[in-house]
Amino acid sequence: MRYRWGVWGIAALFSTNALACDLFSAIIDGDAVAVDRCIQAGGEVNKHSAMAGASPLIIAVNHSDRISPRIVAALIKAGADVNYSDDYGTVPLTQAAKKGYMAVVQLLVEGGADIDIKGQDGHTPLMEAAMSDQLEVVQFLIAQGADIHLQDASGQDALARARGWKRERVVRYLESLSPAPGPQ
């Protein structure tokens, strides 16, 4: 049997009513059926959890390595803000791009995520994907119109970031797109 994060523990952290449907717990458990039930029962898909510092969508994206993209799709369909920034300045698309969750990246872009959105540090989803050596995500974001010349707070673009992290596959790809190299 799977550990369910303690019915009372998680429910007490994320819900004002521990007996109510707990959307956060359903997401963390990866239970798509429970997520659907919570949404149908009026679960707030844009509710900010003070304890987690995030929304249900951010929680889902952060757990995308072990949950179905169906949960992310259900949250988006129910009206989750795809450009929501958590307490740390992280947005769903940036997090998914950084971790290489291609199916989630596609869902977020299709759901209207700002492809060039910047976090607190000025990093765009493209920069995070480049630094994390997520070539497939880099290619997808560029194909969707991501601006390869945007710079972060330190004046570096995606190419400079990839160079700094020695992500040679991404560097070669980005260099092939632009005759003018980014900052060395």
Image (cartoon, rainbow, N blue to C red):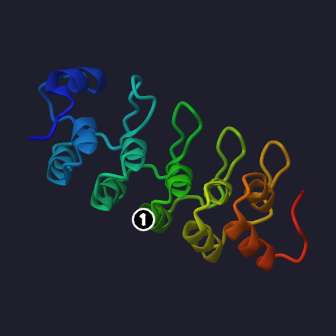
Q: Can the viewer see residue 47? A: yes
Q: Which residue is mark 1?
A: 107
Look at the picture and state if 49 lies above or below 58. Answer: above
Q: Would residue 181 be found to the left or right of residue 78 on screen? A: right
Q: Which residue lies at the image location 22% right of the left edge and 47% below the top edge?
A: 39
Look at the picture and state if 77 lies above or below 144. Answer: above
Instruction: Say which of 130 and 52 sits in front.
Output: 130
Count of marks overlaid on the render: 1
Tell me the element at label 1: helix
Q: Quadrant of the C terminus?
A: bottom right
Q: Which residue lies at the image location 72% right of the left edge and 75% below the top edge?
A: 173
Q: Would residue 153 be found to the left or right of residue 128 on screen? A: right
Residue 156 in picture, x, y percent from top left: 82, 52
Q: Would residue 166 be found to the left or right of residue 180 on screen? A: left
Q: Would residue 54 be found to the left or right of residue 172 on screen? A: left
Residue 11 in picture, x, y percent from top left: 21, 26
Crowding around mark 1 (Cα neighbors within 10 Å: few <14, some 14 to 19, many 20+) is some
